[in-house]
Amino acid sequence: MEIIKKYYSQFSEFTFFLYILGIMSFGRIFAIKHFMVSKIPMFVTEIVLFICCPYVFMNYHKLLKLPKVFIFAAGGFFSLGIFHLISGLLSGNLFALRDSVLSIYMVFILISYLVFLKPDNFKNFLKILIIGNMLAMVVFKYFLFLAVYQSIGDINKFISCSNLSDLKGFNFGIYSNIFIAFIFSFCGMLKKNINKILMFLLLSLNIYTVVSMASRSTVIAFIANIIFFLLVLRGRYLKLMIAYFLTSLILVGFSYYVDFNVEKISSYKKHGSRLTSIVTLFKSILTIDRKAQTINIDCAQKLCVGESVDQIENGLKSYPEWARKKTFATEYMKKILKAQDNLKYISQNEAYGNAYWRMVVGVQAVEFGLQAPILGKGFGVYPDYRLANNQKMTELNKEKFALYSQVISPHNHIITVLMKMGFVGLALFLFINIYAFVVGLELMKKCNNVFIRQYVMAVLGSFVSWHVLALLFDVIDAPMTNMFLWIFLGMIFAIRTHIDDNSANKGFQYETKF
């Protein structure tokens, strides 16, 4: 029996790391691989969970070292999620399976905790992270190439649009932020010049990946990453992190020059358009001139429903404010029009309309959730999202509840949890995460082992960037991004167990080999 347990544990750990490698390297394309079981798709993530569940049961006694208060809170959140999942399925709502990421995926906490109770697996994770990131840089560059040329139409006949949309480049922004956190944390421990050069190149490529997508969410998470490490790093580690970051900007700038001279596309104009859009939108909301605010919101709605800039511009001329140029909308429409001329593949609602769209979705999701404020509306139940002109945003595809279902996420994990699990679920969720973060900060302070301290720092940096992204995007709703939250929680408590057992120095003797 012990032999079976030993080999199955090794097999489970191998599966766990292989899964992380696939996700880090290929993102959504890897995560959506599946086979059908009675017309219900079984995805890669669920298969990994299925394989690893016996591993958890065989080692259940080790889980007793988890803090009791954490077990209670996490168990409560998990139970509430299972209750909503079962309730949804019993009512014949298969969309409840989509929201199971909020409950069933919490098993990754236990898997991660058990995996990282073995000290060598911390270094194995670093290896997977590096290999996966190198592969991801190749895949992302391919994605960028396709995105540019498919949009222009030069090689459209050679490319499958569905394959490009499946790739979802935004996920690589998340993985890059995680990798950047580990580089910032460990750059001071690199001894060999070849390792320093490799990490410098990968840092530059990952920063380039984050900013070249012109995604406000990933850039904000990157900034949060930098701020976190500026606050927690000290001495030589802080100086090296700043040196690595500033030097890498040279290579990032060179990459921009090469890429966008070859491809004849200026990414910074897309950045400028998006930055202008978000500033303009909030100015519109805060402006005292209610008439101007009405005009701005009207413009955003029209962009969302596909009206052209010319049509909106002509419509604005009916307002007296157009002639007096007292509205932000007037000048903003001109900027959008200029951006359209310079960058043909920006959709008309992408810059201004997208920001407005998310606000509408967020507000309606909160209103919907407050209809059942205690335990939430449950899994697989969604608001009938509508624009102010009462136009319905989308229609659910009931035959494709797993992929291409047209489900709209609130793009904010706090609102998502509140809507689906109420204030009870939200309170438990916040407690779980705040408690784990505080534990991580305490570990950094009291740990004398350099490797462990930097590892905790890297995990907390990744944890922070994950939450920042989750506030701005549908990170918690997608398997390939959701699971990293639970994995990081498991890692934090595994390190805590190592330190409490006084086994840290015994298990981490190889930091000088980097």
Image: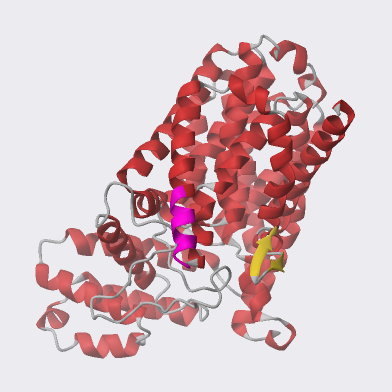
Please tell me which residue lies in front, 155 or 36: 36
Q: Which residue is drawn at the image coordinates 62% and 25% (left, top)?
A: 63
Residue reaching furthest front?
90
Q: Residue at x 78, y 16 (%)?
A: 509
Residue 499, quarter of picture: top right
Quadrant, the C terminus: top right
Q: Main secondary structure of the magenta part?
A: helix
Q: Residue at x 74, y 46 (%)?
A: 51
Work out whether residue 246 can be spotted.
no
The quarter of the rendered structure image containing the N terminus is top right
User: Residue 235: which quarter of the image?
Assistant: top right
When the figure is inspected, residue 388 is found, relative to residue 289, above or below; the finding is: below
**144 or 416: nearer the eye?**
416
Location of residue 488 in the rendering, given as x and y in whole percent from the top left corner: 59, 36
The image shows residue 511, relative to residue 183, as above or below, that is above
Residue sitting at x 39%, y 64%: 381
Chain part drawn in magenta: 83-92
Q: Position of residue 426 (x, y in %)?
A: 36, 43
Judged left or right of residue 377, residue 198 is: right
User: In this view of the protein, which residue sits in the foreground, 274 or 119?
Assistant: 119
- Indicate left or right for 162 with 419 as reference: right
Q: In the rendered image of this protein, does residue 248 appear above or below residue 514?
A: below
On the image, the x and y values in percent for residue 208 come to 62, 54
The x, y position of residue 133, in whole percent, is 72, 49
